[in-house]
Amino acid sequence: MKLRFTINFFVLASFCLVFMSNSGGRASIFGEGNTGAPGDDSKTCASCHGGGDFGAEIEIKMFDMTGSEVSEYLGGETYTVQAQITTTSTPGGYGLQMVGLIDNGDVDTEGFSNPSSNSQIVSAMGRTYLEQQGLSSSDVFESDWTAPVNGSGSVSFYAAGHASNANGSTNGDDSTQSSITFQETTVSNTLDEQLQLTVYPNPVDNFTTIKWGNDKAVNISVSDITGKVVMNTEALGTQTELNLSSLNTGIYFLSIIDNSNNRKTVQKITKR
Ligand code: HEC
């Protein structure tokens, strides 16, 4: 009887260690949003992780497809959202959870996709969170984020995280949280709506066709992820074919500028 109790106890204890481990993320393990956002659970990381001082702070930034930092978003466009935990001394690792809400009603934007390798996208409490996958050695957590439809108004990102001393418990850690609001841009500076830009196939093997919906001269340029322009051409009419066979495989940005009104749109393309 005593033996059976002991065995049961160990089975239960190891079950708890494996399945209750907090390191996977608060939403994935406990179904909780602890970002400090309105409507989230009342706990944040600081409710449990504390006592250490690494000078931790969270910086949230948004970048457009060309890698330029933006302070406003355009409905329906895809951006990269980044949360970085900055510190004044080096911790043993980092944890983070973030959510993006439409301010009007604090409605989830449901915009995250392609999370960085140290993070994951998890649904909990009717919202989608970006959070760590175990203690992260990188202080940067990133995800693509597709903005809500035109007219949604300002959007806020709420992030909470910690710089950890990596001792496997909550003491000696330094928690922090932050939020940032992005206004919606009302002036459209893309051709997508007017020109109905389509690019296919994408991913591209050698040739890709670019179509735009009105009859204007456009300048087409392709740049690599460092921003270096690797191809530049002019086109007339409503479509053209690009030969990308000379490019190495990887991610490129196709940028099209309408010569007559200088509006510009950028699309990510993959050469394979
Ligand atoms: C209710 C308490 C509680 C809250 C709230 C909480 N944690 Fe934890 N967390 C724990 C405990 C306990 C552990 C240690 C044991 C474990 O790994 O299961 C832990 C471990 C971790 C670990 C593993 C490495 C380490 O630092 O020790 C990470 C990463 C982590 N938490 C991130 C977070 C983040 C980010 C938040 C806020 C979004 C958060 N936690 C909120 C209780 C909590």
Image (tube, helix red, strand yellow):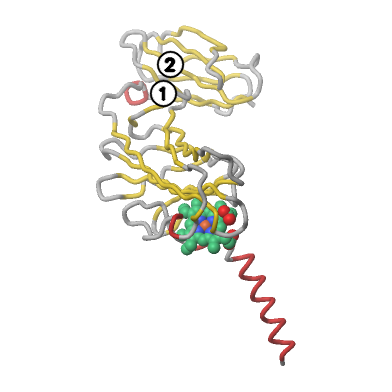
Q: Where is residue 32 in the image (x, y as percent from the top left)?
A: 44, 60
- Name the residue carrying label 2: 256
As drawn, 128 above or below 244: below
Q: Which of 77 and 184 is in front in this view?
A: 184
Report the residue at 60% width, 42% height from top: 117
Nearer to us of marks 1 and 2 is: 2
Q: Is residue 131 above or below residue 199?
A: below
Residue under pointer 1? 197
Task: Give coordinates of residue 268: x percent, y percent.
Answer: 50, 26
- The residue at 54%/59% (across/down) is 170
**Mark 1 closeness class: few <14, some 14–19, many ≥20 residues within 10 Å:** many
Residue shown at 47%/23% (left/top)? 66
Q: Measuring 58% from the left and 44% from the top, which residue is drawn there?
A: 91
**Quadrant where the C terminus is found in the figure:** top right
> Total label count?
2
Of the image marks 1 and 2, the number of the one nearer the N terminus = 1
What amino acid type is highlighted by mark number 2?
Ile
Q: Is residue 13 left or right of residue 38?
A: right
Q: What residue type is labelled 1?
A: Leu
Which secondary structure, mark 1? loop
Q: Nearer the viewer, residue 239 or 249?
A: 249
Measuring from the top left, give residue 251's x and y in whole percent. Answer: 58, 25
Q: What element carries label 2?
A: strand
* Depth check, front residue: 147 or 44: 44
Q: Do the residues labelled 1 and 2 touch (CB within 8 Å)?
A: yes
Residue 257: image location, x then y, percent: 40, 13
